[in-house]
Image (spheres, grey):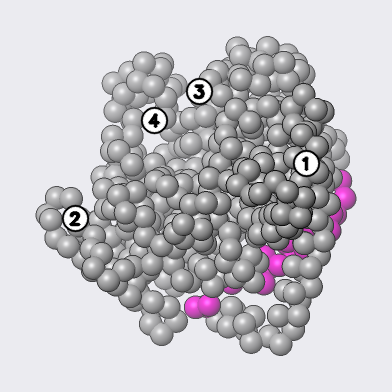
Amino acid sequence: MAQYPSDMFPLSICTWVLQRFPHLEKNGFILIDAWPFMSPMLYVFDPEMSTQFTQVQSLPKSNDIKSEFRPLTGSKDLVTLDGPEWKFWRSVFNPGFSTKNLVAMTPAFLEEVRVFVDKLRAAAQSGEVLKIEGPATSLTIDVIARSVLGARLHSQTKEHPLQWALAKQISWLSPEYTPPSILKLVNPVRPILQWYYNRVIRNALAPSIRQNLSTQADGGGPGHGETKTVLSLAAKAYLAEKPQNTSSAQQANDEFASLAIPHLVMFLFAGHDTTATTLCFAYHLLHKHPPALARLRAEHDAVLCPDPSQAESQLTLNPQLLINALPYTTAVIKETLRLFAPAATVRQGQRGFFLTHPATGARYATEGMFVHQNSHATHHLASCGFPRPWEFLPERFLAPAAPAAEGDDDDDAAQLHVSRKNAFRPFELGPRACIGQELALLELKMILALTVRVFEIETYPAGAPAGAEVLGTYAVGHVSGHPKGGMPARVRVRV
């Protein structure tokens, strides 16, 4: 590992090992035992073996993940809960994250994207090298706040207490098996700061929770001047199961307000972090592959009007275009997620639960181990259904009848398509699949539609520190992968 930087994204470690020791690929997993720092880790990359612990039987989330997020949410959120409690809260929040409901929020999302466009335009006028991850992160936290809370944080123009406290709290999260984390764990001010940041977060969320509960009590919603936010629909689902007399109604409101906060915090964290980094990597890949960028722009010309200034009005009038009229844009996003999978699921191995190799029938015990679905490795193996796995080829996610990309003949394009079921899993699959994946895809399509025809975005321009490119441009982050150096970029307005 000496040839790689110490801050390399841990999700890529399995891919690195398979490159060094390709004979291990036939097993469908690798086992890394880093005792005494952590329990043995089974990195599973075979798609069929991955389905066994995520879809056929959904193993509980790992104790390590629960411990890591405990200071942030008390391990009472959809990411860390298990069993009936998880099932109940998933059903409560599902309606708000439905495609139909999210599409209805398109005008609100576009309002936030407009601020981001102005930020890019200002960077183009100044000629400065912009670390694009910062503005992208502020944009995505504003969007997730609009969808979940129905509130404008204005994080893109000023620092909001909720954004500030959440970022501070996240900075203290760290897995317990690395030396820097040990120093954090023993720092005597850590629990005091975490208590304070959680207090700020709760106080910042309280007005939105009261507003959404008031909307339900007043019979609000569409037709009553209110938007169906994720929170308002969750309150409706929760309160529907509670008695309707006055005292019990107030008690139910108080219960919901308290119990919903950990979920809201996790939505705000997960809903902005990975989406922002995916946007950065999409810009980077498009800059490195001009034919794909040209094809993306051509699709936007055809669907959203050749005049880029009309894109926002087109999407406002017909937001359904984002769902079914931009196949190449969707393919670009999926290929970005394939190359730069933002996160992965880690489950707790169980006594009596064995992984079975689909070809040999060999069985492997999981008790006492973390079972990790390593999407980074899965997505970078031809044997897992991804021909030419290190190339950026959005065409692999288009329907077979789609025209071939520039430089590919029809036969080559047909052979690119993902050939193994359950292989593409950036949001995971099965009952624990990411609840916010439709929001992420909708948001990314919207941002690309309003920016790629207006700007040239040159990532890692000459003179900007790029750092070493290792298995892509990941280098930092333990919870999710981030672009090296915040992804410096030079922005120019297209003539």
Quadrant of the rendered structure where residue 74 is? Answer: bottom right
Q: Residue furthest left?
A: 360
Q: Residues under labels 3 and 2: Cα distance?
A: 35 Å
Q: Residues under labels 1 and 3: Cα distance?
A: 41 Å
Label 4: which residue?
Answer: 396
Q: Which of 454 and 207 is in front in this view?
A: 207
Q: Residues under labels 1 and 4: Cα distance?
A: 49 Å
Within 10 angstroms of label 1, few (less than 14), some, or many (20 or more) residues? some
Q: Is residue 404 inside the magenta stretch?
A: no
Q: Which of 244 and 52 is in front in this view?
A: 244
Range covered by the magenta-colored residues: 156-178
Label 2: which residue?
Answer: 357
- Amino acid, disc 4: Arg
Within 10 angstroms of label 2, few (less than 14), some, or many (20 or more) residues? some
Q: Residues under labels 4 and 2: Cα distance?
A: 27 Å
Q: In this view, does 394 lie above or below 166?
A: above
Label 1: which residue?
Answer: 217
Quadrant of the rendered structure where residue 422 is? Answer: top left
**Label 1 element class:** helix
Do the residues under discs 1 and 3 have CB atoms within 8 angstroms? no
* Image quadrant in which the C terminus is located: top right
Could you tell me which residue is drawn at 26 percent across and 48 percent down?
48
- Amino acid, disc 2: His
Label 3: which residue?
Answer: 327
Q: Residues under labels 1 and 2: Cα distance?
A: 54 Å
* Image quadrant in which the N terminus is located: bottom left
